Image (cartoon, rainbow, N blue to C red):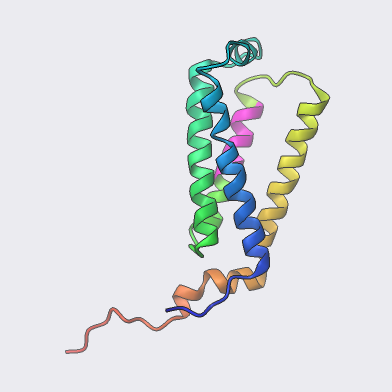
Amino acid sequence: MDNTKRPLWVSVAGWYVTIFGLFGFIVPLMIPFSSVFRLTIQTSGGSVVFVFAYSLIYAILRTIAGIGILNGCNWSRFLYPTVVLGGIIVSFFLYDVPNNSARQSGIYFRRIADVAAFALLVRSDASRFFAKDKMSPDTTKVES
């Protein structure tokens, strides 16, 4: 059993990523039931099927990254910024976002919070926590 304690900042970042990943499931759940939501997607230049698929994949990957961060999986702190960067590219280049100051403020807040969460994951104490598997002795070697 590994006694490496998870740093507080890793917990904060991991829960942030996980919770917003779970909130991401709201969009794909709303599309089939809300005609207003579907109309909003279509008037902003997006495809309903594309937004459904993108939202579902984004929510799944972000939730997996968050759970991985909480469990100390080193790959998860690289999956997380990759998913966020992909989300930024998709949201800004593939369909228009209506010019709504509240929506824009929400987008800016999320991006700043994403950068802050990533900064917490590359701190030296976080790096030691994620590198714990490399520092433990190899128990898979069999002596002959």
The image shows residue 67 at horizontal and vertical percentages of: 51, 54
The quarter of the rendered structure image containing the N terminus is bottom left
The image shows residue 141 at horizontal and vertical percentages of: 27, 82
Camera sees residue 121: no
Residue situated furthest left in the rendering: 144
Residue 96 lies in quadrant? top right
Residue at point 59% right, 36% down? 87
- Left or right placement of residue 5 versus residue 100 in this view: left
Q: Is residue 122 above or below residue 95?
A: below
Camera sees residue 117: yes
Q: Is residue 84 magenta?
A: yes
Region of the chain picked out in magenta, as a range: 83-92
Residue situated furthest right in the rendering: 101
Residue at point 65% right, 56% down? 13
Q: How many marks?
A: 0
The quarter of the rendered structure image containing the C terminus is bottom left
Q: Is residue 28 magenta?
A: no
Q: Is residue 83 above or below residue 95?
A: below
Q: Is residue 19 above or below residue 9?
A: above
Of 112 and 92, the residue lying toward us: 112
Residue situated furthest bottom in the rendering: 144
The image shows residue 89 at horizontal and vertical percentages of: 61, 33
Q: Is residue 104 above or below residue 144?
A: above
Q: Main secondary structure of the magenta part?
A: helix
The image shows residue 77 at horizontal and vertical percentages of: 55, 57
Residue situated furthest front in the rendering: 33
Residue at point 66% right, 14% down? 44
Residue at point 52% right, 72% down? 131
